[in-house]
Image: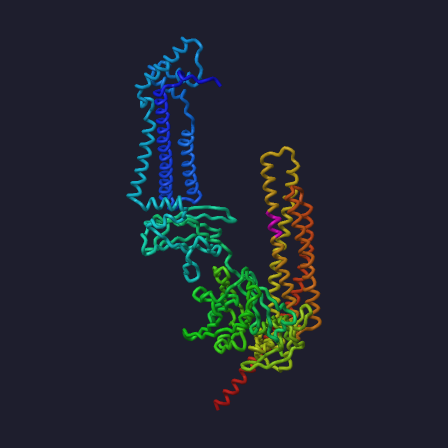
Amino acid sequence: MAPTHSHNRLPDDVLSVLNDLRTRIRRYVLIEGASLVVVMICGLFWVSYLTDWAYFRMSRLELPGWLRSAFLILMLCSLVGGALTWIVARLMRRIRSRALALVLEKRFPELDDRLITAVELADSGEEDDSPLASAMQRRTITDAALVTRNLDLENVFDRRPLKRALVGAIMLLVSIAGLGIADASSVQRWYSAFVLGRDNYWDPFRRSALSVGVVAQPGDRFQKLTTDEEYRHPRGADLVVRVDVPEDKVVPEQVTLHYHTTGETGSSQGRVTMTQVGNRSFRHVLSRAMDDHQLWVVGGDFTNRRPYRVDVVDPPRIDGISLECDYPAYTGMNAFADQLVPVQGTQVSLPVGTRFVLKAGTNKALLGVRIRSPQFDLSIAAPSISEDQSTAELPPSASSQLVVKSEESDESMTYPLRESDVQQLFASGGSGFELPLVVATDAAERLANWNASTNIELPVPPDVPLQFELHDTDDIWSAEPTRLTINGIVDLPPVVETRLKGIGRSITRLARIPVEGTISDDYGVRTARFGYRVDEAEAYEYADLSQAPSGQKSFPLGGAELLATEPFNVRPLELSLGQKLILSVFAEDADDISGPHESHGELYTFRVVSNEELLAILYDKELNLRLRFEQIITEVTEARDDLAAHLEVSREAQGLRGVEQPTDDQRALLDQANTSLAVCADRRLQSMRKNHTETRSIEESFAEIREEMVNNRVDTSTALERIDDGILTPLHQINEFDYPEVDQNIALFRLVHEGGEDSAAEIQTAIRNIDTMLDRMQGILTEMQRRETFNEIVKLYQALLEKEQELHNRTKKSHIDSLFGE
């Protein structure tokens, strides 16, 4: 290392100036850095304070904890970072004499580089070998020392940044101090929020407080909501939110409900202004809640930090009901009917006297069930209800009891149920219940004398609705009661449906009265018989049927054969002419509970006439039928003539169709012919079908006349043969073969014509078949006219008999008058 020469050493005056400048710089840095740190920390204080204040004014909530923690960390980091950056790092930096000399040279031009030269020579420690150079160096150092004695080092510094930092720091500190003096609670609130990290630091400063709850059903029960627990609400029911204001708090001008829903139907959010109810309550209804809700309530300077959670769950419901039945013995249903009857809908029908166990399955575990009817109110509580669930919370189902209502007054009787019986009513797991019942017409009397110690079976009257209300483990009641009506099938009297077959209301003394029909009963016919009375007799006399019922539900009179009848013989009664006979069929069922029940069919009244009078009555019927038949022949003849007239129209139309270039007149004639043919086909098709129906009715009427003759025993083989061969057989031929063939011919005529082809052949075929049918009709009419001659002779004979009877009566009366005259 080169030796240091004393004459190159800086003078003390120069060293003093440089050290003084170095000290001033460090003091400047320290003061400015501390001021900047204070400004930054105070600024962050005001930012956090105002952010918290503004956030609360907008949301009525404290700042989130993570944000406050972030502010605190930011302030600490800023404090440490600012101190290290603006103070420690700058103070730790080495300040060289050369750098100080350059600063002075720049600030004071009068130094004329002498100071920097002196500093550099002192730092180098070398001296020039020539005396001149050494002298010059010493001279430079001496001059530099002389000049530096008079330097004002304050001019080196720009005090404006320092002043700004100091003023800013002082102002911020004064503002914070003033805030602490004017509103110490706000500084304490900031300290609680950002330093202590409390969540509810705004609570002591709120003017409003709200108690939020839900009005639950049934009974408008108020259940307070908390942010720590979910409230479970029945799906589909109205969510009624109620807000109460404590007495020591200010009632806000309005309360706003914010909600957010999420669920299977999507998500939505909104807000509504709640309606004030009373002085310190607000209310709003969220209709038909289907999805989970999150609720925030804002009123005055209050809102909840965390949302109130509403978990929407399915309300308790009955998924299915089945009845395990024990039917009355007389019905015989236990042997063949399903004893486990599923209930479809809201009604089920059972015979009166049926004992059954109602088994209901539910979608959730139950706390209790309430069954109501006009006669009783049954409440049963599941054994799983804990003792801490008070009756105030579960009023209808907290205890198991039966309340029997009086029909005559408002009084009622309460019967507690035994725990052992209640346990048998609930299914394992509580997701269902069972209830033994019996359908009884005297249910009111049985309920009045009900004894729970012997039997828990409840009698229910027929056709009375039952209402089931369920209470589940979520403390939710059924939105609507499940309704079930047990329709009691009262065993009605047998239904007797009868008709007379081949007999009129006028009969001979030897008549046989055929009755056809069916006797039906819900559970079987025990007995059936004829009942009759003569003239004005009040009591019926009875006659057994040829075939008696044996418990069938449907018993056909006369047996199961087709068209079978049950005959009633009049001959054993030995009736006289002119007497009146009233006849019916009586039946009785096997009901041994509220029966037996007896009923009868239609009452038939008959008048006893002579054979001649009956034949005259039948002749009048034949005469009317003949007149109807003549009208049918006339209409069929008109149809035949109409078809014959349109045969030429069809030929003309076919000729017009063959013209290659028809004129307008020819087209008009063709259109007119086509229209006439179409109308003819439709008209004749309808008229033939009408005549067919009427002809079939005439055939049936003649068949009834024949049967009436046979049943009244006024028939002869000759008369029956003439009716069968001369009328019924040809009429049957016409109805079964001729009419269908003509109908087919006319229908084919219409089809061919609609196809635009020549229909003359089809018309000709229809005319031939109608001619054949007319020939048969004329033969039938001839036979009817022949029978007219015979019938007129019978009628004349009947008239002679009537005149003879009248003459006899007059002679007898005259004889009596002459005797009394004497």
Please state the horizontal and vertical placement of residue 148, each as a whole percent of the image: 33, 18
Q: Is residue 123 magenta?
A: no
| Majority secondary structure in the magenta region | helix
Instruction: Determine whether 273 is above or below 621 in the image.
Output: above
For this rendering, which residue is in front, 147 or 564?
Answer: 147
Q: Is residue 528 left or right of residue 820?
A: right
Quadrant assignment, res 248: bottom left
Instruction: Determine whether 672 is above or below 727 in the image.
Output: above
Q: Is residue 681 magenta?
A: yes
Residue found at the far bottom of this picture: 822
> How many numbered marks, from 0 up?
0
Please state the horizontal and vertical placement of residue 201, each as a whole percent of the image: 38, 48
Inspect this view and state whether residue 88 appears.
yes
Q: Which residues are magenta?
A: 679-685
Instruction: Determine whether 426 is above or below 451 in the image.
Output: above
Colour mapping: rainbow
For this rendering, which residue is in front, 147 or 288?
Answer: 147
For this rendering, which residue is in front, 515 or 769?
Answer: 515
For this rendering, which residue is in front, 67 or 557?
Answer: 67
| Residue at 69% over, 52% down | 768
Inspect this view and state whether residue 617 appears.
no
Please state the horizontal and vertical placement of residue 766, each as a whole percent of the image: 67, 51
Please state the horizontal and vertical placement of residue 346, each as a whole percent of the image: 53, 63
Q: Is residue 82 left or right of residue 488?
A: left
Instruction: Determine whether 581 is above or below 722 in the image.
Output: below
